[in-house]
Image (cartoon, rainbow, N blue to C red):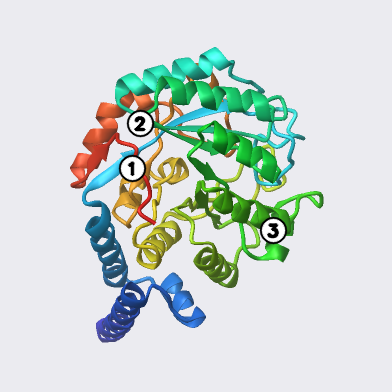
C-alpha cells in the first residue's frame, strides 16, 4: 500500500516537473515574442502545477514592473445610471429585469462624487452606466465638459456601451479621454449565446475600431467562464486583442446574477482569471490591466492576487453609498468597505502589503 502510494507520488512529481519545464519554455517564448501558436496558448491555460503557475505570474510581474514600476493606478468609479436599453442575458441591470431597483444620478450628484474623489487624490474618473437613453449625447457631453473645466488635470473615462460614431466623436470633443467597451467574446456563436438577437457581434467590433480611430484610449475585454466559453473561444479573444491592440484590457470572472437567464450557471474562477491576466501582460507589456471588482468579489484577496498576476489598475467606487448596492450587474458585488473610495487608506495598505504603491495620478497607457 505504502509502496503504491510512493509510486503515485513520484509519478505526480515527474509530471509536475515536466509541466514546469514546458511552461518555462512557453512563458519565455511568450515574453520574448508576445505571441504563441494556438496550441501553446491552450497549454498555458490548462496548466495546473503550482510551480508552473508561479513561473507565469513571476514573469508577468517582471514585465509589468519594467514599464510601470510598483505603481497600481487607482480610478474613481462613478456608476451614474443602472437603466439600460439592452437585455444581455448575463447582466443584472438588463432591461427586462423587473426586480432591479433603478436609479439615475443627477448632474449635481455626479459632480459631488467627482469633488469627493478629487479631494481624495483621484485623477481619473470613470463614468459607467447601462445604455440609458435619458443621458443623451448633449446631456452627457455637458457633464464631460463641466468635469474637464473643474478638473483639467484629470482624465475622464466613459464606460457607456454602444453608440454611433458621431456620438463618440462629440463626447471626445467634449473632453472624454478614454472609453471602455468590452468586446465580451470574439466568437460570434458565443456572442449570440450571451446576447439577444437584436444585439450585433459586428456592431460591437465596429464600435471599438471607431473609438480608436477617433483618438480615445480604448479598453476592450471579456468575461472569464461565461456560459459557452471554451479554450478555443478564449484563444479567439487573444487573437482579436492582438488585432485591436487596445490601451486597456478589462477581464474578470463571470459571476451569475439571480435575476438573469444564467442564474444557475457556474461562475468563472480565480485561477483562470489569474492565468489570463499574466498571459495578457506578457502579450501586451505596456497595457493598462485592471484587477477588477469581480475578482475581489469571488475571493477575499482576489484584487491583490490580480496585481500579483501582472495587473496594475484598481477602480474603487465613488458612487453615493445609497446606490452602490443597486448597480448589481452580478451577485455579491463589492460596494462597501475597501471597494468604497473613502477607504483609500485601507486599499493603499493592501497594495503595500504585497509590495506595491497605490498611485492616484492619471496613469495614461504607454501603448
Counting residues from the start of the chain, the first of labels 3 and 1 encountered is 3
Q: Is residue 190 left or right of residue 54?
A: right
Determine contact: label 3, label 2, CB under 8 Å: no
Name the quadrant of the C terminus. bottom left
For the residues carrying marks 3 and 1, which lies nearer the camera in this image? 1
> Could you tell me if residue 331 is visible in this image?
no
Q: Position of residue 62 (x, y in %)?
A: 23, 62
Q: From the viewer's perspective, is 134 left or right of 235?
A: right
Q: Name the residue under label 3.
A: 191
* Direction front: furthest residue: 173
Residue at position x 32%, y 41% in the image: 73
Residues at badges 2 and 1 in contact (C-beta under 8 Å)?
A: yes
Q: How many marks?
A: 3
State which tag comes first along the sequence, 2 or 1.
Answer: 2
How far apart in space, not on screen, are marks 2 and 1 (Cα)? 8 Å
Q: Give the residue pinned by disc 2.
A: 123
Q: Nearer the viewer, residue 337 or 357?
A: 357
State the separation of the CA atoms marked 3 and 1: 32 Å
Which label is found at residue 363?
A: 1
Amino acid at each position: 500500500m505504502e509502496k503504491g502510494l510512493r509510486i503515485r507520488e513520484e509519478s505526480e512529481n515527474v509530471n509536475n516537473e515536466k509541466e514546469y519545464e514546458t511552461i518555462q519554455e512557453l512563458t519565455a517564448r511568450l515574453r520574448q515574442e508576445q505571441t504563441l501558436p494556438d496550441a501553446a496558448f491552450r497549454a498555458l491555460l490548462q496548466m495546473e502545477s503550482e510551480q508552473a503557475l508561479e513561473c507565469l505570474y513571476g514573469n508577468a510581474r517582471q514585465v509589468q514592473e519594467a514599464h510601470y514600476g510598483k505603481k497600481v493606478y487607482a480610478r474613481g468609479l462613478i456608476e451614474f445610471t443602472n437603466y439600460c436599453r439592452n437585455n444581455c442575458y448575463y447582466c443584472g441591470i438588463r432591461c427586462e429585469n423587473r426586480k432591479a431597483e433603478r436609479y439615475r444620478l443627477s448632474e449635481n450628484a455626479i459632480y459631488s462624487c467627482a469633488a469627493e474623489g478629487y479631494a481624495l487624490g483621484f485623477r481619473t474618473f470613470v463614468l459607467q452606466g447601462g445604455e440609458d437613453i435619458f443621458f443623451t449625447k448633449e446631456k452627457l457631453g455637458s457633464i464631460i465638459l463641466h468635469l474637464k473645466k473643474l478638473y483639467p488635470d484629470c482624465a475622464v473615462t466613459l464606460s457607456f456601451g454602444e453608440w454611433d460614431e458621431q456620438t463618440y466623436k462629440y463626447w471626445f470633443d467634449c473632453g472624454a479621454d478614454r472609453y471602455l467597451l468590452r468586446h465580451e467574446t470574439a466568437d460570434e456563436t458565443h456572442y449570440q449565446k450571451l446576447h439577444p438577437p437584436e444585439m450585433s457581434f459586428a456592431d460591437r467590433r465596429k464600435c471599438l475600431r471607431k473609438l480608436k480611430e477617433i483618438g480615445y484610449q480604448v479598453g476592450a475585454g471579456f468575461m472569464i467562464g461565461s456560459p459557452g466559453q471554451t479554450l478555443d473561444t478564449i484563444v479567439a479573444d487573444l487573437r482579436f486583442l492582438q488585432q485591436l491592440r487596445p490601451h486597456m484590457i478589462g477581464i474578470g470572472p463571470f459571476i451569475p446574477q439571480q435575476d438573469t437567464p444564467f442564474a444557475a450557471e457556474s461562475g468563472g474562477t480565480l485561477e483562470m482569471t489569474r492565468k489570463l491576466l499574466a498571459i495578457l501582460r506578457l502579450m501586451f507589456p505596456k497595457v493598462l490591466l485592471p484587477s477588477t471588482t469581480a475578482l475581489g468579489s469571488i475571493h477575499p484577496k482576489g484584487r491583490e492576487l490580480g496585481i500579483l498576476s501582472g495587473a496594475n489598475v484598481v477602480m474603487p467606487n465613488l458612487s453615493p453609498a445609497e446606490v452602490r448596492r443597486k448597480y448589481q450587474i452580478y451577485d455579491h458585488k463589492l460596494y462597501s468597505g475597501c471597494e468604497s473610495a473613502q477607504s483609500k487608506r485601507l486599499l493603499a495598505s493592501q497594495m503595500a502589503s504585497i509590495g506595491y504603491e497605490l498611485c492616484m495620478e492619471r496613469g495614461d497607457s504607454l501603448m
